[in-house]
Structure formats: C-alpha cells, structure tokens
C-alpha cells in the first residue's frame, strides 16, 4: 500500500516539475562580459532564427513528430 502511494506521489511530483521547466532564455549580449559579447550576439541570432522557424512550423500546423525535421529544413534554407 505504501509503495503505491509513494509511486503516485513521485508521478505527480515529476509531472509538476516537468511542466514548470523554464524555456531557454534569449541571450542578451549587453549582460555578458565584454570578451563574450560577440559570441552572445551570434547565439542570440541563432536563437531568433530557431524561434522564427518554430513560429512558421506552428502556422503550418506541423505535427509534433515532424517538427524537428521541419525546423531543420527551415534553418538550412536561411
């Protein structure tokens, strides 16, 4: 009986943790040390391209299973 209650608790706890996981934030080159600003600007540019391709995939109503290949194809075209 205790094992079942523990299993339910762990399942619910892990579901809550996974749902509240934060998304990756956009890099702000101004908040990075001066020697890393160029790399941060490049990373932000990559992030913006990925966000744009994800938006296009949402608008095209691409299925979740096909989204990675759709986004990769979009990135290759840019």
Image (cartoon, grey):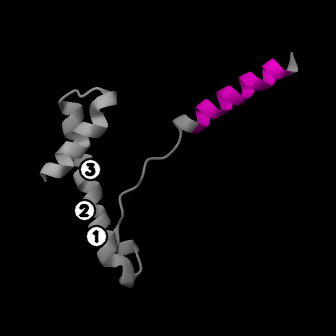
Q: Is residue 17 above or below residue 39?
A: above
Q: Residue at x 67, y 32 (%)?
A: 13
Q: Is residue 26 above or below residue 61?
A: below
Residue under label 3, please give it.
Answer: 50
Q: Residues within 10 Å of mark 3 (few under 14, many from 20)?
A: some
- N-terminal of the pair, mark 3 or mark 2, is 2
Residue under label 1, please give it.
Answer: 41
Residue 72 at what x, y percent from top left? 24, 45
Secondary structure beneath disc 3?
A: helix
The boundaries of the magenta stretch are 3-17
Residue contact at pointers 1 and 3, CB within 8 angstroms = no
Q: What secondary structure do most residues of the magenta stretch adopt?
A: helix
Gap between marks 3 and 2 measured at Cα: 9 Å
Residue contact at pointers 1 and 2, CB within 8 angstroms = yes
Gap between marks 1 and 2 measured at Cα: 6 Å
Q: Residues within 10 Å of mark 1 (few under 14, many from 20)?
A: some
Residue 31 at what x, y percent from top left? 39, 73
Q: Quadrant of residue 42?
A: bottom left
Q: Residue at x 27, y 59 (%)?
A: 46
**Residue extending furthest left?**
77
Q: Residue at x 19, y 32 (%)?
A: 59
Residue 15 at what x, y percent from top left? 60, 30
- N-terminal of the pair, mark 1 or mark 3, is 1
Q: Residues within 10 Å of mark 2 (few under 14, many from 20)?
A: some
Q: Quadrant of residue 58?
A: top left
Tell me the number on the disc at residue 20: none
Q: Residue at x 79, y 25 (%)?
A: 6
Q: Is residue 53 above or below residue 9?
A: below
Residue under label 2, please give it.
Answer: 45
């Amino acid at each position: 009986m205790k094992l079942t209650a523990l299993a339910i608790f762990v399942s619910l706890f892990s579901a809550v943790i996974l749902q509240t996981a934060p998304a990756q934030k956009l890099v702000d080159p101004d908040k990075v040390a001066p020697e890393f600003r160029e790399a941060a600007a490049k990373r932000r540019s990559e992030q913006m391209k990925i966000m744009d391709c994800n938006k296009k995939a949402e608008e095209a109503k691409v299925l979740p299973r096909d989204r990675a290949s759709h986004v990769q194809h979009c990135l290759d075209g840019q």
